[in-house]
Amino acid sequence: MHHLLLPADVGLAGWDHDETEDTFRGNAFGKAWSLFVAAQGRYPVMADDSGICVDALHGAPGVRSARFGTEEAGRALSDTEKNSLLLKKLEGRTDRKARFVCALVLVLSAERHFLVQETWEGEVAHQPSGENGFGYDPIFFLPELGKISAELPPEVKNQLSHRARATRRLGVLLDDLTLHP
């Protein structure tokens, strides 16, 4: 079993890192490395970057998922506003394939880094639905289930999502590292 701590738990309540890279793995590594340095290497560090990539929009919003529409609006948008903007950009398009991506980085030392990146394949729905989840969940349709992510109970979403997949993969790695440091 592994015990996770938040930055605030180790005296780094004000820690923050700007996402300036153009890939999920770059942003995840930047966050993990920045936190590792801030913690003076006293702890292994894990960080992620996640977002939605839409094929018809050449992978957008992608790494800018959290900031999607900010430049156009001149302010940060709410999740509902980002979803509306994404739906507007897809009006009239038949290719609605999309995926959530999660890059998860573990930094054990200056020389030991591990990356896991996973996806959750689906489509962008034509309208929002559901009350569970956050972000783009209300418009992320899962054809194999016939449901939108926000319609799934949290325990189901937490078994299927991109973050769940990446976390499981990293868990296997952590178990191996525990047995074979």
Image (cartoon, grey):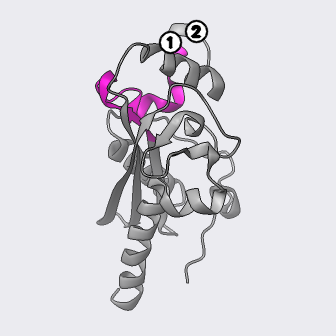
* Number of residues whose C-alpha sits closer than 10 Å to that of mark 1, classed few (under 14), some (14–19) or many (20 or more): few
**Which residue is painted at 31% across and 24% down in the image?**
56
Asked if the stretch drawn in magenta spans residue 158, the answer is no
126 is higher (above) or lower (below) than 85: below
* Nearer to the camera, 89 or 172: 89
Q: CA distance from mark 2 to mark 1?
A: 5 Å
Above or below for 5 versus 2:
above
Please identify the quarter of the rendering in which residue 107 is found: bottom left
Q: Please tell me the numbered disc located at residue 8.
A: none
Is residue 149 in view? yes
Task: Looking at the picture, tell me which residue is in the foreground, 6 or 119.
Answer: 119
Q: Nearer the viewer, residue 22 or 83?
A: 83
Q: Are marks 2 and 1 in contact (CB under 8 Å)?
A: yes
- Name the amino acid, label 1: Glu
Mark 1 sits on what residue?
71
Farthest-out residue, front: 146
Judged from this view, the residue extending furthest toward the bottom is 179
Is 145 left, or right, of 3 in this rendering? Answer: left
Other-residue count near label 2 (Cα within 10 Å), few / some / many at <14 / 14–19 / ≥20: few
Q: Is residue 77 visible?
A: no
| Amino acid type of the residue tagged 2 in the rendering | Gly
* Element assignment for label 1: helix
| Rendered-image quadrant of the C terminus | bottom left
Q: Which residue is mark 2?
A: 74
Question: Residue 10, percent across and down?
Answer: 66, 63
The structure residue drawn at horizontal position 33% and vertical position 89%, both measured from the top left corner, is 180
Span of residues in magenta? 51-70
The quadrant where residue 104 appears: bottom left
> Residue 52's spot in the image, x, y percent?
43, 36
The reply to whether the magenta stretch includes residue 60 is yes
Residue at screen point 63% across, 46% down:
151
Side (left or right) of 112 relative to 129: left
